[in-house]
Amino acid sequence: IVPGWFSEISAMWPGEAHSLKVEKVLFEGKSDYQDVVVFESATYGRVLVLDGVIQLTQRDECAYQEMITHLPLCSIPNPKKVLVVGGGDGGVLREIARHKSVDQIDICEIDKMVVDVAKEFFPDVAVGFEDPRVNLHIGDGVAFLREVPEGTYDAIIVDSSDPVGPAQALFERPFYRTLDQALRPGGVICTQAESLWVHMPIIKNIVSACRHTFKGSINYAWTSVPTYPSGLIGFMLCSKAGPAVNFLEPCNPIDQAIDPEKSSRRPMKFYNSAMHAAAFSLPQFAKVELEHL
Ligand code: AAT
């Protein structure tokens, strides 16, 4: 509407739109699945947009990628095999790689163009693909999960776009069932679970579907990401029946394990154990709405 500004307009957050000043459009493409845009913004660095929706910016991607990764991985002892669904930019891979116990990192991203664009325009994020433990599969996460042998993964991170277009099925019960089957007993999932301010009906569906599917712990967490709708985003954390998981008290902290001298990657910017515990505190309205589902 205003020349030189990008506004994130969507029926998923009617009546509001966050805007960023555009310095320069760097890439515009159309993949088999979605429109892909990269632009340089005035104040958030480079921005990746899929079908008109902001997926990440250089300035605040740390908050999302660190939280969606370390909330699950710091909640279980010794994670070894980890799967990422979506996340084709590589940021979640970068964060998983901080965990020394992990020996296998599989990723299933539907859109190869996201991977290619991330490697070209977001090297600090796509650096995640350089870890030798990573196996990249290009394909639909739903079909991929159907083929995973039972009990394969310690943790699955669903870094998915919003439930319109290719990601819709990633928010449905049949998909959650395949996630549960793919986990070893006591294994955990963490999924992108939208905003408490604008998506309460979607969140209620996610929570009730997960209560139905996962027989371990089920907790909703959230964090601040200024360029996501309403400035925050939530995560659904669930564990499979088996060894008990207490998401609220991380048993596998990595704060101390990070040695900036030894790592070629930058240190974490957002996550620490106090942020982990705080992420599960819910505002009263959300607590009430999510309690009896
Ligand atoms: N880490 C950046 C944040 C994202 S990226 C979401 C990714 O999920 C995209 O690369 C998209 O191509 C991929 N994706 C969508 N559907 C599927 C599918 N069915 N199988 C595999 N990958 C898929 C999320 C941003 C959240 C935005 C909040 N408004």
Image (cartoon, grey):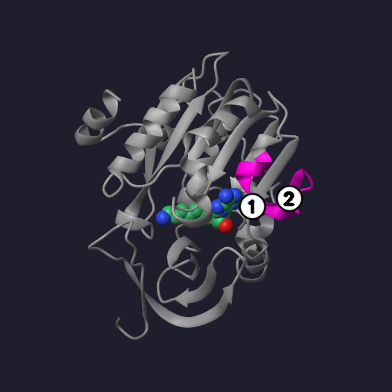
> Among all residues in the image, which is located at the extreme right?
132
Residue bearing the label numbered 1? 109
Residue in front for this viewpoint, 45 or 33: 33
Q: Is residue 68 magenta?
A: no
Decide if ligand 1 comes within 8 Å of the CB at mark 1. Answer: yes
Please provide the residue range marked out in magenta: 128-144
Tell me the element at label 1: strand
Residue beneath the point at 22% across and 28% down: 288
Image quarter where the C terminus lies is top left
- In the rendered view, would you say 218 is above or below 243? below
Location of residue 200 (image quadrant): top left
Q: Is residue 229 above or below residue 171?
A: below
Tell me the number on the disc at residue 136: 2
Q: Position of residue 103 (x, y in %)?
A: 75, 35
What kind of residue is marked 1? Glu
| Contact between labelled residues 1 and 2, with CB atoms less than 8 Å apart | yes
